[in-house]
Image: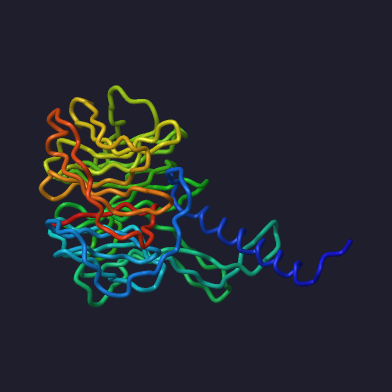
Amino acid sequence: MSRHPRELVFGIIAIGLVIGYGVLGSRAAPLVLPAGTPTPTPTKPVSAVPAPQVAGTIAFTLRGDVYVLRDGRYVGVTSDARSNQPNLSEDGRTLLFVRGEAINGKRDVDGQVTPAILRYTDIVKKDAGGGAESIVITGLLLQTASGFHSVAWWSGPALSPDARRFAVTTDAAGGASDLEVFDLQTGKRAALLSQDSFLADPAWSPDGKTIAVTSYTLGQPRILLVPSDGRASSPLAIKGTTGESYRPSYSPDGVWITYTLRHEGRNDVHAVEVKTGQDVALTSDGRSWNSVFSPDGRQIAFLRESVGVIDLYVMDVSDALVGGPPRAATKLTRGEGIDGDSRPAWGR
């Protein structure tokens, strides 16, 4: 029996959307996402939203735009629905983030030239208070009249402690993702720290000597410590845990790294003492991930999912890191639909 023409049209559209999203997702660095139901689509904030008071500035992603929380309110600093992965300088003034772009071009598929939408990302710089933007590096590496453009997919920009450089991962041959360091002012590459590895989520140590990353090179994610001077990297030792560790972030004194531990399909926020490997569980709900330390090292900001809604939370961890129990977390956002892929950032 033949199908109704309208059903055929809708079926073709659905298949096209699935393929399109699959292609886009395949360009990004490998990610370990928490299990759970999808976030609903509530009304997106269009003006400043009151929030609990926290010290400093927190940047996060809400449905494809970067928001900044400061002085008891949060407000969007982009409005294109294509921006994510924010990172802040230590003083909270300089904001870096990733913006998705696309260009019509061509590809050679099995010896046949076909039209193609080539997707890439730019790393964008902006004052955290708003104002003009500038593209620091673009993923449109080469634009040609023939349509065979060269593009790159940059991910996870992380400013160095002196805000003169930033680390980023980019796609490489064979599906790998290399770790590179660029000069913030010139946009020129200062160092290539890995080749043919599968790295993501760079985060600098406070002294600028080490970049912690998530490594997928051996398959299961683990945290790797990469010297910024090009010396050999080493895995971060974590005692007494089983599961997959990913998305590290240093404390301001460099003593601790907070990270997400995925265990038995659940995600929780942990902290590990870098020198000893001593591990501390900071959450136990199984729905918390993507944590970063506050500028004073006493708190963490992280994401938590509840009944399908992802929100930004803050927690005092000063007692937990010296053997006490974790304190209750405070919700900072109002269920508008935080993007679960993007780690927040916290500056002064």
Instruction: Establish if 342 lies above or below 122.
Output: above
- Of the 4 image quadrants, the one containing the C terminus is bottom left
- Of the 4 image quadrants, the one containing the N terminus is bottom right
Which residue is situated farthest in the right direction here? 1
In this rendered view, identify the residue nearer to me: 27 or 272: 272
What colouring does the structure picture have?
rainbow
Which residue is situated farthest in the front direction here? 307
- Residue shown at the point (81%, 69%) measured from the top left: 4
Residue 192 at what x, y percent from top left? 33, 48
In this rendered view, identify the residue nearer to me: 32 or 209: 32
- Residue shown at the point (33%, 60%) measured from the top left: 61
Residue 281 at what x, y percent from top left? 26, 32
* In the displayed structure image, the side of residue 144 where residue 272 appears, left or right: left
* In the displayed structure image, the side of residue 146 where residue 67 appears, left or right: left
Residue 172 at what x, y percent from top left? 46, 50
* In the displayed structure image, the side of residue 229 where residue 155 appears, left or right: right
Number of numbered discs visible in the structure rendering: 0
Instruction: Establish if 123 lies above or below 256.
Output: below
Q: Quadrant of residue 52?
A: bottom left
In this rendered view, identify the residue nearer to me: 42 or 168: 42
Q: Quadrant of residue 125?
A: bottom left
* In the displayed structure image, the side of residue 1 where residue 238 appears, left or right: left
- Residue shown at the point (43%, 51%) measured from the top left: 308
- Residue shown at the point (28%, 27%) measured from the top left: 238
